[in-house]
Image: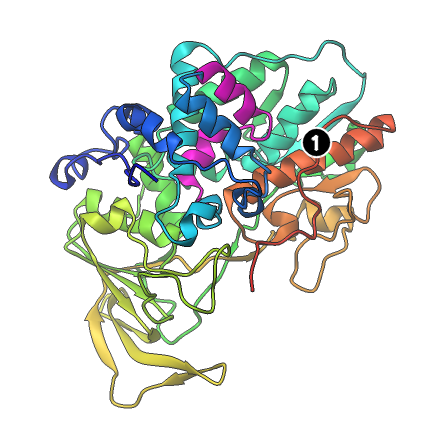
Amino acid sequence: MKNDREVASRRPVEERVGDWDEVYPGGMGRALLPIINVQASRCMDCGIPFCHQGCPLGNIIPEWNDLVWRDDWEGAIERLHATNNFPEFTGRLCPAPCETACVLGINQPAVTIKNIEVSIIDKAYDSGFVRPQPPEWLTGKTVAVVGSGPAGLAAAQQLTRAGHTVAVYERADQPGGLLRYGIPEFKMEKKHLERRLEQMRREGTVFRSGVTVGEGKLNGQALKDRYDAVVLAIGSTVPRDLPVPGRELGGIHQAMEFLPQANRVALGEEVEGQIRADGKHVVIIGGGDTGADCLGTSIRQGAASITQLEIMPQPTEDRPNGQPWPTYPMIYRVSSAHEEGGERVYAVSTKEFLGDDDGNVRALRLVEVSFEAGKLVEHEGTEREIPAELVLFAMGFVGPEQPGVVEQLGLDLDERGNIKRDNDYATSVEGVFVAGDAGRGQSLIVWAIAEGRAAAAGVDTYLTGSTQLPAPIPPTARPLVV
């Protein structure tokens, strides 16, 4: 009631677009330290803290806010780690549904919960408060976790700490999943991932990178025969496509073709035949976080122009009446990438890609649209062309890849193509569990970590008959909506 909401200042645009470092000076956590105690004091310690409802992890937010205000950083990280294995990831990448559920946010700017969270974990690393927590004894049971994204890592860390011998399989050459190759360095420097992986290794988790489960001798059945339990955390990786005339032209790519290559180069690797935006007119189809990542990456590569298309109308800056507190509203948000350049065009649909004489895309024809009675209606006379020499699809994903381990194990799927699971995250095949987007569908990082923790509790119960691991959400839990 005494202090206004304040966030850390980002580096000047002209400075940060010249490198791949995080957009905050010295890193996000350190940039926040001068203001974070006062921001933590804004927490009202509500009798019924609805921020808990916004966060599927069940983070005990008022308690660690109070500990930060009292300058008890070791107590704060203990309280934060009690519910969240990876606050350095969520504090940088989660869109903070906890903040839109903050009680203070009913009539004032909400508490900067996400900023306080990342300050706690960065301070904890700097102070040596993040230590390995190896199990006191081993159960003799073995678990394979397939996929090393946030869900797989959370499940692996929980099961390792419960005393099981855990191996994490990752088809990429290094663990981390999209945390490593899907998230640009300016959004989260990979040192944050590396030091968490090092903690997990010291606890006993084994990582087997460059191994595609479902190919060669290590097929689904061989994996099941080798381990006492299997956790599939393979994500929702089949991208949504746009089958309009001209789709076959060169220069049209999925975001997850473009971003991993750029991330590898930013980390010092060489990528033969890299898809680049240098000097090109870039069009990004999709207005979400992945589209913003493509935008920031294209700017740093020196694109001539960048246009980001969104089929929905431009959101309002204030919470819509139909999305009341404490739901997560669709409002106009500006990411760090949007501050750096590019044009955002709303309420348009792509009609056709136009090519040049060499078979490459040169332009995109779009039309203005609106939703009327639940149907998409094109507005006559609004068609126009915009230059497009590189087109990136950032329209989300439709489900997990079925060829390979999913088909080999004969897993049942739901009506949306996701892997079916029961209340303990167990699939239709005994001893095989699923966590994260592969079972839920495309979702947020905070839901993936919550599912990984909950699935670990289900696996532990299956292996030992009981568990002391927390299960923050059932698989049927969904974000709070009207």
> Which residues, given as a range, are shown in magenta?
73-96
Residue at image position (71%, 60%) is: 414
Q: Nearer the viewer, residue 336 or 473?
A: 473
SS at mark 1 in the image: loop
Instruction: Decide if residue 333 is on the left or right side of residue 435.
Output: left
Q: Where 441 falls versus 4 (above or below)?
A: below
Residue at image position (39%, 30%) is: 40
Q: Nearer the viewer, residue 72 or 288?
A: 72
What is the x, y in percent for residue 3? Answer: 29, 37
**How has the structure been colored for display?**
rainbow
**Residue 79 inside the magenta-drawn segment:** yes
- Which residue is under mark 1? 470
* Quadrant holding the C terminus: bottom right
- The majority secondary structure of the magenta stretch comes to helix
Q: Which kind of residue does numbered mark 1 sit on? A: Pro
What is the x, y in percent for residue 147? Answer: 59, 36
**Residue 253 inside the magenta-drawn segment:** no
What is the x, y in percent for residue 319? Answer: 39, 61
Q: Where 30 falls versus 445 (above or below)?
A: above
